[in-house]
Amino acid sequence: MTNDNKQSAKTVLITGASSGFGRAAALRLAQTAGQIILLARRQSRLVELQKVIEQTFPHVKVHSHAMDLRDDVAVDALPTILPETFREVDLLVNNAGLALGLNGAWECSLQEWDDMLMTNCRALVRLTRRLLPGMVERNRGHIINLGSVAGNWPYPGGNVYGATKAFVQQFSRNLRCDLLGKNIRVTNIEPGMADTEFSLVRFSGDKAKADKVYEGTRALSAEDVAETIFWASSLPEHVNINTLEVMPVCQAWAPFAVNREMASPD
């Protein structure tokens, strides 16, 4: 179900907009939004995406800004350095995030753990905190956080990545509690297996290894998740999708793992 004729968000801000879910969401939301702010680290990709949106959707005003969301100073300054006409953000899509490595917890890189915590948790929280007062003052807005099925269901090697997405889930729920009585929606969207640059990043650019993850499957596409984001944001303003877990049909939960080789106690 979609509602292309109604889009409550006039100004949309998307993090991690240079690829994957973020890029697809920008293109989908541009069909009805009035203004879009694109945030990501890769300037060249942002410039390319801005051109595509402006050429395809001439009614949309676009502002792109290259920044690393792990930079506290840059995040704190964002609300005041945006062009004045872009400062009243109606829809914040906290999409930026990453998984790094798939090793057991005893052999993981602490730097990779820190990078996931900084990007998936700290940056998301800090940007939300900077933009939320404006939403409260205007008494309108929608925050869509990109969680993951990994926040609900553990898997070997998921360790800190899964923990960060569980954090996103609880942060989203607690935002809803704090915002009760205000006309601000909060949604946590939790995709399962999706064929984007996700695994390429996780495996440090090893394309063969990343491709193996999706071999023989029909995984979600970035456009599938973008459509979900659009749907949640285009519902009537009194309707809040709290949490939406979405998987491809080829993916489901596994039985409990049982190791039968461990020695029994005497």
Image (cartoon, grey):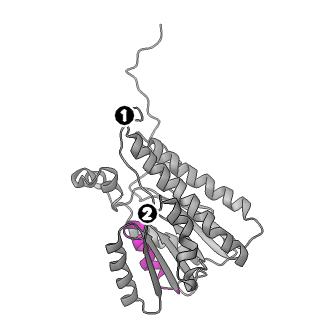
Please tell me whether residue 233 is drawn above or below residue 128 in the rendered image.
below
Q: Decide if residue 244 is in sight here.
A: no
Residue 51 in sight from this viewpoint:
yes
Instruction: Provide the residue span drawn in magenta.
Output: 18-34
Residue 100 picture location, percent across and down: 37, 49
How crowded pointer 2 is (Cα within 10 Å; few <14, some 14-19, many 20+) is rated as: some
- Of helix, strand and loop, which one carries label 1? loop
Question: Residue 44 placed where, x, y %?
Answer: 31, 74
Residue ID at (33%, 61%)? 197
* Magenta stretch holds residue 29: yes
Q: Identify which amino acid the numbered label 2 is placed on.
A: Asp
The location of residue 156, given as percent across then percent down, is 41, 39
Q: Are marks 2 and 1 in contact (CB under 8 Å)?
A: no
Q: Nearer the viewer, residue 173 or 265?
A: 173
Circle 1: residue type: Glu
> Badge 1: few (under 14), some or many (20 or more) residues near its Cα, within 10 Å?
few
